[in-house]
Image: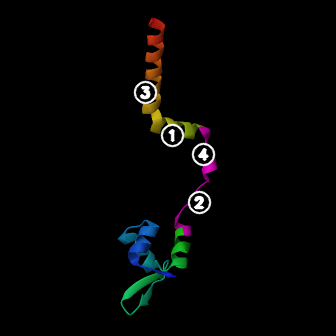
Amino acid sequence: MNNMLTTEEVKNFLEVDQTAFDKFLKEGKLPAYKIGGTYVRFRKEDVLNLRSHLMPKRPPYGGVSPGARIADFWRFNNFYIISILIVLAVIWVVTRLY
């Protein structure tokens, strides 16, 4: 199993641009290794350690409030909910007329 990553793989994994990547290298936060004299590689363990320090601690999914869940549900499904209500109202009106 390959334990080394390329610069592009590290930038994609850390979700940073070239300037931030260069800053990590200059500050010594991300040790680099040369393989074959010219290719720069990074150990997975070093990248994972840097990512754990960069990424803020997120609360688990269970920490989301019920109001926020309902708001998200409405935001993504409001078209369908309104459509169903309109169809039900039309059916109710039609059944009352006959």
CB within 8 Å, label 2 to label 3: no
Earlier-in-chain disc, 3 versus 4? 4
Mark 2–mark 1 distance (CA, rounded to whole Å) = 22 Å
* Precedes in sequence: disc 2 or disc 3: 2
Residue at 37 percent across and 68 percent down: it is: 17
* 28 w.r.t. 69: above or below: below
Q: CA distance from mark 2 to mark 3?
A: 40 Å
Amino acid type at circle 4 is Val
Distance from label 3 to label 1 (Cα)?
18 Å
Q: Which residue is mark 1?
A: 72
- Quarter of the image with the C terminus is top left
Q: Which residue is mark 4?
A: 64
User: Which segment did they paint magenta?
Assistant: 52-66
For the image, the number of numbered tags is: 4
Identity of the residue drawn at 45% across and 75% down = 24
> Which label is found at residue 57?
2
> What kind of element bears circle 1?
helix
Disc 3 versus disc 1: nearer the observer: 3
Q: Earlier in the sequence, mark 4 or mark 2?
A: 2
Amino acid type indicated by mark 1? Asp
Residue 51 - label? none
